[in-house]
Amino acid sequence: MGTRFLSGSVGRFAWRLVASSCLGVALPAALQAAPVSVSTGAELRTIAVAAKKGDTVHGILEREGIDRQNRDALLRGLAGLFDERRLKGGDRLQLTVEQGPADTRVRALRLDAGVAGDVIIHLGDGRHAAFAGGERADVVVRHATGVVGQSFAKSLRGANIPAALIGGVVAAFQLDPDLPRVLPPAARFSIVYEGTAGRRSLDGVRIRCVSIDDGERIHRIYRYETRDGELALVHDDGRGVALLDLRKPVAGAPVTSPYGWRVHPVFGDRRFHKGIDFGAPSGTPVVAAAEGVVEDVGWRGNYGRYLRIRHDRHLQTSYAHLSRFAPGVRVGARVTRGERIAFVGSTGIATGPHLYFEVIMDDVRVDPLAVPAAVPIRLSGTELANFRMRVQDASGE
């Protein structure tokens, strides 16, 4: 099992480059970072080089007899990702080269330069580096591979995949009709995810792509953002899951009344509680559980001051018994995850200050403490066409 890091300035890699890790079998030591077309009469081989004091990448490539145009393309690709002056004795280069009848060309380069992180460049045609600018420099991209073993979820945890990603990945693969119900223990996975560098770990982690090789075929899913902003993990055929990531609306508040049947504290009869209560003092800030648009706000009878947010086609959250709303909160206003939207109160029918919180999925109120990590979706029409164009671009076809 191995993990690779593309960090700092290396975060400028394009989606295509990182997605290439999921387009083939889990990356082997030979660094076949993506399928490459090999010229007739040519063969691929791997060259491992340990830099000596005073070495440069240019000098190493020249010493290995790499074709000049191919060498120049690699150096152009490397220019924005790694300063050659930082190369030091002991740094390692791994070259996947095509040995033709007339010249030697690098198809993939991996540079392990210690604190600089691993730099990977893939040249699909031997002349153009598969990378592009545009991403924020603080994006950290991680790639991990491993064996599925007896439990895919457990193996992902063992590979130090963030817990927030595991449920969605497992749910997405459960929708693949071609994936064996019981995976062979020797099946291998490859996962690429990203986040921003935090003090101790990555913040805002998101999947880029995942693949499973079951020994007979490779199954893949890709992260895709739909036109309405829904973040999903999608298979090649357009089936997948929309990811859910809800934040607790009141920091540190205990659940004082759970979801389910209970004796109503005011009316005294047995009623089904379709949300949960968070106990907190009046005036405690309430934040949006996820990004979305305010759909309803105002006084709503027993609920008192009430607020509902639509997050996507499937998901809504509501907040009730509020003392007041935050400035700017109105119907149509867009809010971000964790943004202050209101304050705890005891308006409407309530025995004391608390927040009544509901999660509504496809118009059904569900237990907020048991919300699944993902819900099934299926792309169609122009949405499916857009997704397939992106996958095709990622594969370089």
Image (spheres, rainbow, N blue to C red):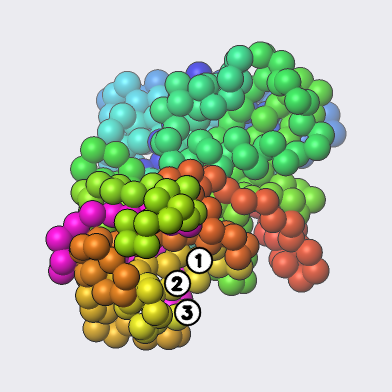
User: Measured along the vertical axis of the image, is residue 250 above or below residue 69?
Assistant: below
SS for callout 2: strand
Q: Mark 2 points at which residue?
A: 309
Q: Is residue 325 visible?
A: yes
Q: Which residue occupies the foreground of this view, 231 or 220? A: 231
Q: Where is residue 389 in the image (x, y as percent from the top left)?
A: 73, 61
Decide if residue 63 is in sight here.
no
Q: Quadrant of residue 97?
A: top right
Quick check: 372 above or below 5?
Answer: below
Estimate the x, y position of residue 24 in percent, counting from the top left: 69, 34
Q: What residue type is labelled 1?
A: Gln
Please rate how many residues cluster around mark 3, counting C-alpha atoms within 10 Å: few if below 14, some from 14 to 19, many from 20: some
Horizontal side, residue 85 vs residue 33: left or right: left
Looking at the picture, which amino acid does disc 3 mark? Glu
* Residue 38 or residue 350, whichever sits in front: 350
> Residue beneath label 1, please?
316
Contact check, label 3 and label 1, Cβ < 8 Å: yes
Q: Callout 1: 10 Å neighbours few (<14), some, many (20+)?
A: many
Q: Does the magenta stretch include residue 152?
A: no
Q: Is residue 284 magenta?
A: yes
> Marks 3 and 1, how far apart in space?
9 Å
Q: Which mark is residue 295?
A: 3
